[in-house]
Amino acid sequence: MLATASAGRADLPAGLIRRFIAFYPGCRGFAASTTWSPTAPLAILHGEADDWTPIAPCRELASRVPGVSLAGFPGAFHDFDAPVPVRVLQNIPTSQNADRSVHVGGDDAARADAVRRVLALVAQR
């Protein structure tokens, strides 16, 4: 998703896109870049407890790249916006856990807050 938002893409005419909204993206490669920037404002919505795509690189990205904002949801895992119970997946190579497990599943409070934030962002002109 963040690759889609990259500035300098010849296939995106200036002004075509007003903003991007990304749910729990992998920010590591983009945070490591000293030249990456989005073509339009980018709002990242991320679970603070995400052990599949950790929030730390997204924090770094939002702290130094103009136009990138981050909303973190305490206690929420990957897929926090899904209306399903939290479960554990095994053998995930990108896991932050020693046993290569990750937690995925919904968080009612985080989902409600994210929906409110997305609606507000989409309503902006």
Image (cartoon, grey):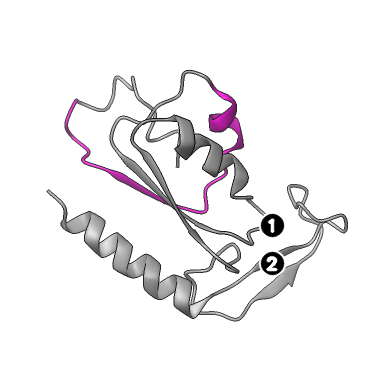
Q: Is residue 108 above or below residue 113?
A: below
Residue 24 lies, in percent from the top left, at 52, 53
Residue 47 lies, in percent from the top left, at 55, 61
Image point 52% across, 47% down: which residue?
Answer: 25
Q: Is residue 79 magenta?
A: no
Residue at the limit of the structure toward the front, as seen here: 63
Mark 1 touching mark 2, by CB under 8 A? yes
Magenta-tinted stretch: 14-33
Disc assigned to residue 103: 2
Q: Is residue 81 left or right of residue 86?
A: left
Residue 65 lies, in percent from the top left, at 42, 30
Image point 55% across, 23% down: which residue?
Answer: 33
Q: Which residue is mark 1?
A: 51
Within 10 Å of disc 2 (Cα), the crowding (few <14, some 14-19, many 20+) is many
Residue 114, picture quadrant = bottom left
- Mark 1 falls on what kind of element? loop
Image point 76% across, 54% down: which residue?
Answer: 92
Within 10 Å of disc 1 (Cα), the crowding (few <14, some 14-19, many 20+) is many
Upstream in the sequence, badge 1 or badge 2?
1
What's the residue type where badge 2 is placed? His
Task: Count up the numbered dots.
Answer: 2
Quarter of the image that includes the N terminus: top left
